Amino acid sequence: MQTARDVLTPDALAMLQSIDTAGSFAAAARAMGMVPSALTYRVRQIEDALDVLLFDRSSRQAKLTRAGAELLQEGGRLLQQIDAVANRVKRVATGWESQLTIAVDTVISKSTVMELCESFFSLNPPTRIKLRDETLTGTLEALTAGLADLALGVALDAANVAGIQGKPLGSMEFVYAVAPHHPLAGAAEPLSDALIQQHRAVAVADSIQRGVGATFGLLSGQDVFTVGTMHAKLDAQLRGLGGGYLPLCMAGAYIETGRLVVKKTERPKRQVPLSFAWRGATASTQGRALQWWLQQMESPATRAALLEQHRGNS
């Protein structure tokens, strides 16, 4: 009988991920160019070796059991570690990483990031770039969890995290804003916490995967509408779905045209220091792609553009 080590190969883990993504054995078999019976046989080999059921076969859908979900979660981490090893080997051989993953906080200018990507690709490097949208503490977690090599817009002090280096990116001012038709638009200033608490807040969900995420500007007992990105938060507040703090650089154009109204509150102005951070302690351990990106970050104009050049909802 085969052992767990015999059957839990990278290909087998990727196959299980494909079944879960496709939602059925038949759909996964078509996507992988396999005969359904062959796919089912391979899954049963894994189940026999582990002595567990990975999929609930009581319906036509391939639904993971609790054991299957745990295997996929841990298996996904194993595949990431394998990719990381391959990345390091590639870097040692050529100086270029096979892939550079950049975690970009949703307060960072997407247009500026794309301009940097355009400049990087003009070098025709062998490195693939992968961008990850992150929010709040999830931006730093992407680095510490090994899911990213570089993070832009870290709101926490990365200098005290082992294996992580960081430098200041700049400071971002946040203002409390509502749509002109929102009840708080005509309220007397400064707005008290008691008054704000009576109205719905729009909040961005922290993208952290483990632990408790951060929240900013929320009051105890306040109704909250949670969205996935800062751009979605801006859109929600433009529609009058709630109030909340927005980056002035992102909301400025809407404030100037009257689509948003800035309200003074009893709380002090919010200036949030942001940084960029990366994995690896010394230049000798950095691949050429990471070195190129860090060189761009040395430019004051680039750092300012990442914080300020927001074009609409870009």
Image (tube, grey):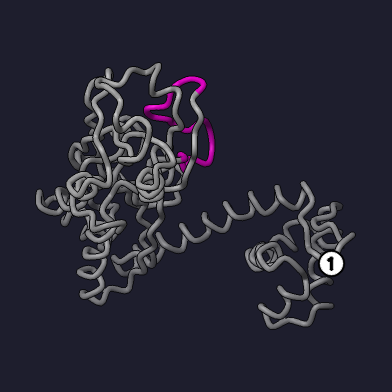
**Who's the residue at 79% across and 51% down the image?**
65
Judged from this view, the residue extending furthest toward the right is: 58
* The image quarter in which residue 312 lies: bottom left
The secondary structure that most of the magenta stretch takes on is loop
Find out whether residue 260 is within the magenta segment: no
Q: Residue at x 84, y 52 (%)?
A: 52
Residue 187's place in the image compared with 14, above or below, is above
Examine the image and state in which quarter residue 40 appears.
bottom right
Image x and y of residue 71, in percent: 70, 51
Q: Which residues lie in the magenta part?
A: 205-221
Count of numbered marks: 1
Label 1 residue SS: loop
Would residue 260 be found to the left or right of residue 25 on screen?
left
Say whether residue 177 is left or right of residue 241. Answer: left
When the figure is inspected, residue 194 is found, relative to residue 214, above or below; the finding is above
Q: Is residue 211 above or below residue 33?
A: above
126 relative to 259, above or below: below
Which percent across, then down, holds residue 80?
52, 56
